[in-house]
Amino acid sequence: MCRIVAVIDRRGVQARDPHGLIETMRDTMQAGGPDDAGLALFTQGAQGTVALGHRRLSVIELSPLGHQPMASSDQRYHIVFNGEIYNHAELRAELIPLGHTFRSHSDTEVILAAYSQWGKESFKRFRGMWAFAIWDNQEQQLLLCRDRIGVKPLYWYHQGGLTLIASELKALYAHPDLPRRINPTGMRLFLQYNYIPFPHTICVGVEKLAPGTWLTINRSGEVARGAYWRLQDAASRSPSMMDEREATDELERRLREAFRYRMVSDVPVGLFLSGGVDSSLLLALLAKESSSKLKTFTIGFAGTGLDEAPYARAIASALGSEHYEMNQDVDAALAIVSKIPDVWDEPFGDASAIPTWLVAQFARKHVTVALSADGGDELFGGYPKYWRSRDRARRLEKKWGIDRFRAQLPRAFINHLGRRYGIGVNKLLKAKEILLSPKTLAHAAFVIGQQTFIDTDIDQLLVNPAATGTTSFDAWDEFPLDNLNRMMAMDLQTYHVDDIHVKVDRATMAHGLEGREPLVDHELVEFAQTLPSAMKIRGSTGKNILRQVLYRHVDRSLIERPKMGFSPPLDRWLANDMAPLVEDFLSEKRTKDVGIFKVSAVSEVRRAFAGRAKDNTQKLWNLVIFEQWRQRWKFSL
């Protein structure tokens, strides 16, 4: 696990030291690669300069033979790589008879040999998580590639003869010629979803490389793109004809295989354990195959009503793990708030980033790799929003005439009703927007239902309202699935990629800890797409088929309880300990001086939160997070 950076500068700018500049960019990410650092500088005469930089967290091949940038045996290709190829030993065995020799046990060297042998077709053979850049000395071309599910990040900027590539935005911010201007589309998407879905970012001109894709930039600066894997294609395969027992057997087989691959490491491996279905299943299956006790890590929220630590403790005891537990200290948690703009370097509103940061810090004292059980909700229907969106669409359809009339009511009148009669204004406004949407009711109910600020909110909030951009939320009709499975697919391409993966990746790498996500193994993902939603969701209970696997190994009394999530008591913090922070970042004077949000609209959000109006905690938090980020990185519109 590492951090990478690349620069191509064809502008003929000679005043700056390219070696020093790439080092500066690279070393903004030192926490994610504390064990080693490398740099390769290529000059192209009048065409400019190419540089690759790398920070290394040593997990596989701990010796200097794993140093990057790494060159192919013929010196044609040079790679910087972030991630793990779990099947590298199998690929190595396949490549040796084809004439390839290896100096190390590194998976990086296997990528180079596979690309030399099979070109872009090699990407389909990799099983793992990755983001890499390969410079082709012969063709004078840079290749970028990202894993299928977007576990590892990759950002790129390509304007006016300057190309910048990095694992984190802050590395790009370190280049003096990157414009620090807010992307209005990225800002609007953040306000809506609490994160920014790919390909968009908060920075004008910077994109996230889409999962499952490659991109090349040739000697003339021309860009070509392609996809080697698409979730839509996996979803288009014939539905499984297995009955539920057969499907459960096959699921367990695939889970065991995916989990086993994620244990490949030359350093200690542990597990994040919440005591819920997914992490308990991960521990249960791995414990059966491990010759020693597995290390598990849990963080608690004592006294908040959100504490899963007792459940994790019970699971750890039942399965015999070496369990480590810490209770979240409020002061320690609040101290992390000031770090959010540096660790998550574009606005990121998922408050569970705070406990994730803490548990990663805690685990790093004992292990170098930690497995996280994220992905089960998106693959097997664990979030209540799936059946709630389904049920909401059905209700609106039944009362179509009445609700169509209600949808025509002016926003100001709905706000008046809410203030006078205590009606849930956000709920009414979302219903209005769903009914007026050109999308189908199920599609609109799912997308709009999970938004924090809906479109009309944002139009009221921004001094200069911005148009939103295309995201994977718009791919609804590309999936030949039932509506519940479509919702899960949308989440896997949006929320999971740019919220869950970003949260875990930044929190773990901030402490030099490698996070692995076994439940989003691509073969497991593909299998899940063939299962009907009826095998996943029963009424208002999700992950049915996962539970059937788990109950073979753990008594169901240890698992059966309402879904809790991994969130801190944000409403309490904002009202008390964080109140000075709210006042600082969202004061009338600051809001007016910055000129992005309307003073009246920000004041209304604050008043609604103070009155404990439902659903305004996240709105307030997003505004605080945005202004904190803007101030830290000195961005303007």
Image: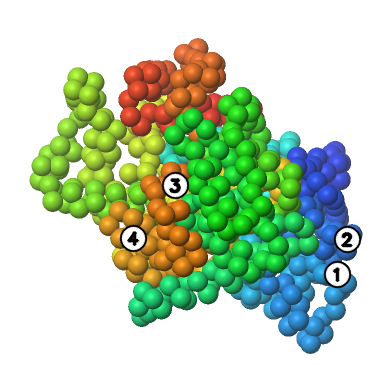
What's under tag 1, amino acid-wise?
Ser
Reading the chain from its start, which is encountered first: label 1 or label 3? 1
* Residue 219: x %, y % from top left: 73, 61
* Residue 526: x %, y % from top left: 48, 70
Q: Secondary structure at mark 3?
A: loop
Q: Mark 3 highlights which residue?
A: 469
Question: In front here: 557 or 25?
Answer: 557
Q: Mark 2 highlights which residue?
A: 63
Callouts 1 and 3 close, C-beta under 8 Å:
no
The nearer-to-camera label among 1 and 3 is 1
Callouts 2 and 1 close, C-beta under 8 Å:
yes
Reading the chain from its start, which is encountered first: label 2 or label 1? 2
Q: Mark 1 highlights which residue?
A: 104
Reading the chain from its start, which is encountered first: label 3 or label 2? 2
Crowd tier of the residue under label 2, counting other residues whose Cα lies within 10 Å: few below 14, some 14–19, many 20 or above: few
The nearer-to-camera label among 3 and 4 is 4
Report whether residue 435 is seen: yes
Label number found at residue 529: none
In space, the residues marked 1 and 3 are separated at their CA atoms by 45 Å
* Residue 96: x %, y % from top left: 80, 83
Residue lying at 24% horizontally and 40% vertically, measured from the top left? 431
Q: In the displayed structure, would residue 9 be above or below residue 284?
A: above
Q: In the displayed structure, would residue 377 be above or below residue 298?
A: below
Q: Which residue appears farthest toward the top when viewing the image?
A: 589
In space, the residues marked 4 and 1 are separated at their CA atoms by 47 Å
**Viewed as shown, does residue 114 lie left or right of 483?**
right
Q: Secondary structure at mark 4?
A: loop
